[in-house]
Image: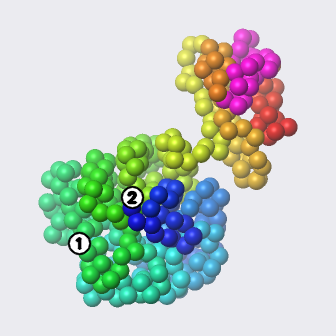
Amino acid sequence: MTRRSLIGNVPVGGGAPVSVQSMTNTHTDDPAATLAQLRRLAAAGCDVARLAVPDTKALAALPDIIKESPIPLVADIHFDHRLALGAISAGIQAVRINPGNIDSEKKIEEVAKAAGEADVPIRVGANSGSLPANLAKKARASNEAMAIALVEAAEKQCALFERFGFKNLKVSLKSSRVPAMILANRIFSEKHDHPLHLGVTEAGTIKRGIIKSAIGIGALLADDIGDTIRVSLTADPVEEVTAGIAILESLGLRTPNPEIISCPTCGRTEIDLMELAERLEREIERMKERGEKVAAAKIAVMGCVVNGPGEAADADIGIAGSKNGKATLFKHGETIGVFPQEEAFQRLLSEIRGK
């Protein structure tokens, strides 16, 4: 088991539930825009958010953002360790340091001292795209070489922090190569008990990025490796949170709220299944946004009666395609009635709302 660390009020490691992170893509020196996005992330279920602190303008905005943020924040620091010191002074809940561009012993000592006094955890974030120069060249040879280089970079910086008496460390070993990312985390987890932040860096747009992230993050979580995750997407950060939660739900690490199941379409499909399933997802999201209670843990939208009350018998409520454009409404495998498609869908929504 890994060590326990706290990012604000969110426990990471030591058997704590796996938390979901994202990163704002607003300019941090615009507090209003950044806070608006942080509120959207929190509403979507994000536990912790990271934000870029690239310069003194961003640093100056931190106190206002930290004060109003609905979730704990991690300052993402590159190149200039003084920005890390400023973020800690501003009250940030955690700091990410990249061993590829901040590796001076003196600078690490200063950050370790400040973080230790403020009881702020540090994430040592090794990234395949910004490895130290002495490791970057040989890392290109293979996935195994990349994994070993990531581990070496993280270990070296962790050792520096620990030499200066600082042990409140988390580690991430990220690569755009999924096999390298998986192997690096496996190697590191066998040798150390630092909490691990999992992610596939530069994963891409929504479709490919979610696939790569689900494989990389999911493979490790399935083997009980990983304490907090981020799905990195070229998309609205809320999509990262949605995908991260879905990964945890699929592994049984987070309870769905609710779980929606739908069958693949085939020649037996008697209703517009894709449209109804997508409508249902949108309606559930609107209910959550309005703070309405969802009175069903598992909801089914099935194409025909073969896949309906039978295969989805464990669903609390569901509909299945029937003849002549109608749909069967069922509860726990028992048919309630057969109705025109739209009426069946509206009855389904009423049941979900507990009416």
Residue lying furthest right in this view? 355
| Rendered image quadrant of residue 147 | bottom left
Q: Position of residue 47 (x, y in %)?
A: 56, 61
Decide: few, some or many residues near mark 1? Use Cα within 10 Å; few <14, some 14-19, many ≥20.
some
Q: Which residue occupies 35% across, 80% down?
A: 166
The amino acid on which the numbered mark 2 sits, given as a three-letter code, is: Met
Residue lying furthest top in this view? 323
Q: State the SS at label 2.
A: loop
Q: Position of residue 243 (x, y in %)?
A: 52, 48
Question: From the image, which quarter does the N terminus lie in?
Answer: bottom left
Q: State the SS at label 1.
A: helix
Image check: 218 left or right of 173?
right
Q: Which residue occupies 70% across, 31% down?
A: 316
Q: Which residues are magenta?
A: 315-338
Image check: 100 left or right of 240?
left
Q: Which residue occupies 30% across, 84% down?
A: 164
Question: From the image, which quarter does the C terminus lie in?
Answer: top right
Image check: 302 left or right of 21?
right
Are the two marked residues, 1 and 2, in contact with CB atoms closer than 8 angstroms? Answer: no
The amino acid on which the numbered mark 1 sits, given as a three-letter code, is: Lys
- Reading the image, the residue beneath label 1 is 156
| Rendered image quadrant of residue 257 | top right
Using the image, tell me which numbered label, if any, was put on residue 1.
Answer: 2
Q: Nearer the viewer, mark 1 or mark 2?
A: 2
Decide: few, some or many residues near mark 2? Use Cα within 10 Å; few <14, some 14-19, many ≥20.
some
Residue 102: tell me if it is visible. no
Whether 323 is drawn above or below 331: the answer is above
Q: Which residue occupies 79% across, 17% down?
A: 338
